[in-house]
Amino acid sequence: MSNSISQILIAVLGISGTLAAAVITQRGADRARARELEHTRQLQQEEREYATRQAQLEARRTCYATLSAGTRDLANVMTKVLHALEKGEMTDELRSELDQARREHRLRHAEAQMVLPDTVAEAASTANRHLGELYGLLKQLDGSAAQQGENLNLEVAWDRMDKLWEPLWRMRRIMRADLGITTSNQDP
């Protein structure tokens, strides 16, 4: 009987070992699948974050390009107005062009304020302030908003126009640095 008990015991141990091996193998496979799923989730999360960063970068790039173009357009129209005032050839068409460029710039600047990081927003606000001051001066010189007692002349306007370019270039440099195109000390 001891022989049959040992055979039964060996059979039970063999079956238990086989079953245990299957359970252990299954648990290992489950863990491997769980690690694979977690890895896949992590990769998907990283891809979503990368796509979000790229979309934000593209939105800033577009905003910067639009704002930069608006400031250049307004500055160019202001230069035309200064030349016209100097020659005494100011026209209603040029007045309208100046007002339109100012409105478009203000709209672009307002839209940009919702997207710009603080460093760029500060530079854009400085440039906007200079543009606004020069716009006001041009309107006064044109006579449409002249106030009594003010002694304005074209030299002051040309001086302000010359001083306008530094804030515009500074804004451009900061925008390019923010986009990673250059560092602020690379762009003269």
Image (cartoon, rainbow, N blue to C red):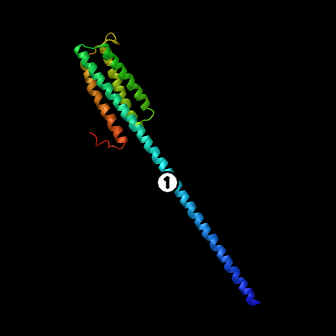
Name the amino acid, label 1: Leu
Q: Is the residue marked by circle 1 packed among few (<14), some (14-19), or many (20+) residues within 10 Å?
A: few
Q: Quadrant of residue 98?
A: top left
* Image position of 45 (left or right of 187): right
Q: Nearer the viewer, residue 84 or 137?
A: 84
Is the C terminus in the top left, top right, bottom left or bottom right quadrant?
Answer: top left
Query: Which residue is at a point 40% across and 29% down the rendered structure image?
Result: 109
Q: Nearer the viewer, residue 85 or 94?
A: 94
Task: Return the x and y of residue 174 as percentages of the image width and height.
Answer: 34, 38
Q: Nearer the viewer, residue 82 or 33?
A: 33
Q: Quadrant of residue 103?
A: top left
Q: Residue furthest right?
A: 1
Say if 176 sits above or below 94 in the image: below
Q: Quadrant of residue 17?
A: bottom right
Query: Which residue is at a point 34% across and 41% down the rendered structure image?
Result: 177
Q: Nearer the viewer, residue 147 or 77?
A: 77
Query: Which residue is at a point 41% across and 38% down the rendered structure image?
Result: 60
Task: Return the x and y of residue 136 as percentages of the image width and height.
Answer: 34, 19
* Image position of 92 (left or right of 32): left
Q: Secondary structure at mark 1?
A: helix
Task: Return the x and y of residue 165 as percentages of the image width and height.
Answer: 28, 30
Task: Return the x and y of residue 187 as percentages of the image width and height.
Answer: 28, 40
Kindly tell me whether residue 187 is visible in this rendering: yes
Residue under label 1: 43
Is the N terminus in the top left, top right, bottom left or bottom right quadrant?
Answer: bottom right
Kindly tell me whether residue 123 is visible in this rendering: no
